[in-house]
Amino acid sequence: MNKPPSDIENVPRYEREDYKKAIEKKRTLGHFSMTMEDHLAIGSTPQSDISWVPGKPAHELLSEERIQEFLDAKIFFMNNKKLIQNGFAQISKDEFLIDVPYLESVGKLPAKYKNFDMSSLPDTKRSNDF
């Protein structure tokens, strides 16, 4: 005999409050503000290389060196022509523009990115030149 679904299972994910809060947090505060619970609420897989602690955001669980690696990767993605064409470079840039101020506000911005000139970021808009 099948067990009837719980109330939460009857509500589409995008209508659930935890989903809405997690999406808004990611949109306004960025990747490093996300907790394991936020990732699960939006249906994403929490990074496997982080030892997640319930309720703790990623920036509290990562070293400055690891955070710098993530930011460096986003810069690399922004400069990759293939990633510009498929749109991933723009996503990386959008995230970077949110992540840097957030990390600065919580005291976790790596020294390399303090006083970073955001206007020096490359143009990541797709062109129609295929």
Image (cartoon, rainbow, N blue to C red):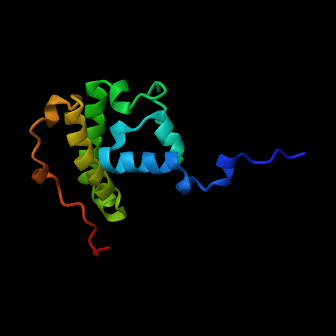
Which quadrant holds residue 71? top left
Q: Residue furthest right?
A: 1
Q: Residue furthest bottom?
A: 128
Instruction: Name the residue at 47% across, 27% down.
Output: 52
Residue 11 in the figure: left or right of residue 14: right
Please provide percent x and percent y for residue 104.
19, 35
Instruction: Name the residue at 39% across, 32% down.
Output: 57
6 and 75: which is toward the camera = 6
Instruction: Name the residue at 20% across, 30% down.
Output: 110
Residue 97 in the figure: left or right of residue 85: left
Task: State the quadrant of the N terminus.
Answer: top right
Instruction: Name the residue at 24% across, 31% down.
Output: 106
Residue 33 in the figure: left or right of residue 18: left
Which quadrant holds residue 50? top left
Number of numbered discs on residues = 0
Residue 40 in the figure: left or right of residue 95: right
Task: State the quadrant of the C terminus.
Answer: bottom left
121 and 51: which is toward the camera = 51
Please provide percent x and percent y for residue 51.
46, 24
Please provide percent x and percent y for residue 25.
37, 45
Please provide percent x and percent y for residue 92.
30, 51
53 and 87: which is toward the camera = 53
